[in-house]
């Protein structure tokens, strides 16, 4: 089934970024939210996103108004999703809220429409119980901002059909994303579990006085972060093993890795003293002293686009 009409339910930061992507790639897009003020902010933010895409050469000259023209706003859920081929839900991260929304979407959409959630932690197996057609419900978790970051983590629930999983992956590929399919539901998705593990150790290093917060961030962004952007951890260590590959690395350098694992942080909630220290130190970072948050975000996005052009050959569309 070709996906041409898309609905974005929830017009917050993630919802408006999804809408930017869908409109940019040629879909007719309905954005729904209960609050008219939020909808107006979403449309303004989406236009700013499109303007940025034009500035960095990802949106063809003259396409700005065409993209904006493909978007309509509504507070009526049924109106938004009624003729949609694909629905991307991005409402509050709560089982209660999402189950209510999915129940309403399930009743209002065409039988063959795909209902996807942007959830980063909640399990679709639980959410889809609120619907009459659970086989078409799935998680499609983006990385923020969705219109720039390539990764989309697709997580089917126990009753999601293989056909819907396949169609969702194909749609994301068509949009230029890098979709990965998670085979089992756990708390969180592949990427945010990995990020959580790294961040816990980053917090702990600052908390224990091993290094300043700025140096910990630099150690990630100027070291493994660059390699992981190209290869990911497994292939990086495979190359680190030289001619012997991962087998050599595990055999000869595995004990060194084990000595680090034995001393890594194991806490499962941030120690209050660590939380206080992180808040204090991040406020003292050079970049936050010199730049506004919106300027930092734009600088980040410009660098992201430059990397995307190198790594994935991103071009205008």
Image: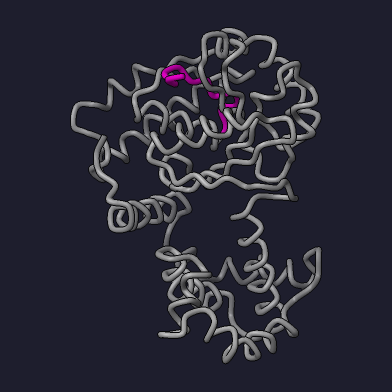
The quadrant where residue 173 appears: top left
* Magenta region includes residue 288: no
Q: Residue at 73% x, 41% y: name it.
A: 122
Q: Is residue 207 left or right of residue 78?
A: right
Frontmost residue, 11 versus 284: 11
6 in the magenta segment:
yes
Q: Position of residue 252 (x, y in %)?
A: 57, 92
Image coordinates of residue 29 in percent, x first then y, are 45, 19
Q: For the image shown, how many numbered marks are present on the structure?
A: 0
**Position in image of residue 262 (x %, y %):** 75, 84
Look at the picture and state if 170 lies above or below 115. below
In which quadrant will I find the C terminus? top left
Q: Quadrant of residue 36?
A: top right
- Residue occupying image coordinates x 66% and y 61%: 196
Residues 71 and 231: in front is: 231
Snapshot colouring: one colour
Q: Residue at x 71, y 45 (%)?
A: 121
User: Where in the figure is residue 103, as x and y percent of width and height?
Assistant: 74, 18
> In the orientation shown, which residue stands out farthest toward the left?
61
Is residue 298 rendered to the left or right of residue 120? left
Quadrant in which residue 14 is drawn = top right
User: Magenta region: which residues?
Assistant: 1-12
């Amino acid at each position: 089934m070709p996906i041409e009409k898309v609905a974005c339910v929830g017009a917050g930061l993630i919802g408006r970024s999804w809408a930017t992507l869908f409109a940019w790639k040629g879909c007719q897009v309905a954005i729904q939210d209960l609050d008219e003020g939020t909808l107006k902010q979403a449309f303004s933010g989406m236009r700013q996103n499109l303007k940025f895409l034009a500035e960095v050469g990802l949106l063809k000259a003259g396409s700005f108004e065409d993209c904006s023209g493909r978007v309509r706003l509504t507070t009526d859920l049924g109106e938004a999703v009624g003729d949609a081929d694909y629905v991307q839900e991005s409402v509050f991260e709560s089982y209660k809220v999402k189950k209510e929304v999915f129940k309403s979407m399930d009743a209002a959409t065409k039988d063959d429409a795909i209902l996807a959630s942007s959830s980063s932690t909640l399990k679709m197996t639980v959410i889809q119980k609120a619907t009459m057609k659970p086989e078409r419900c799935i998680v499609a978790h983006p990385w923020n901002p969705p219109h720039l970051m390539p990764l989309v983590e697709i997580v089917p629930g126990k009753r999601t059909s293989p056909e819907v999983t396949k169609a969702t992956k194909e749609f994301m590929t068509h949009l230029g994303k890098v979709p990965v399919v998670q085979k089992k539901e756990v708390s969180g998705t592949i990427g945010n579990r990995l990020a959580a593990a790294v961040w816990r150790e980053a917090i702990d290093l600052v908390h224990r006085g091993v290094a300043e917060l700025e140096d910990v961030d630099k150690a990630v962004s100027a070291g493994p972060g660059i390699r992981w952007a190209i290869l990911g951890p497994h292939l990086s260590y495979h190359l680190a093993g030289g001619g012997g590959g991962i087998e050599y690395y595990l055999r000869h350098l595995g004990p060194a890795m084990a000595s680090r694992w034995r001393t890594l942080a194991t806490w499962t909630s941030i120690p209050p003293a660590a939380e206080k220290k992180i808040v204090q130190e991040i406020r003292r970072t050079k970049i936050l002293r010199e730049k506004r948050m919106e300027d930092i975000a734009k600088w980040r996005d410009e660098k992201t686009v430059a990397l995307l052009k190198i790594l994935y050959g991103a071009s205008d569309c």
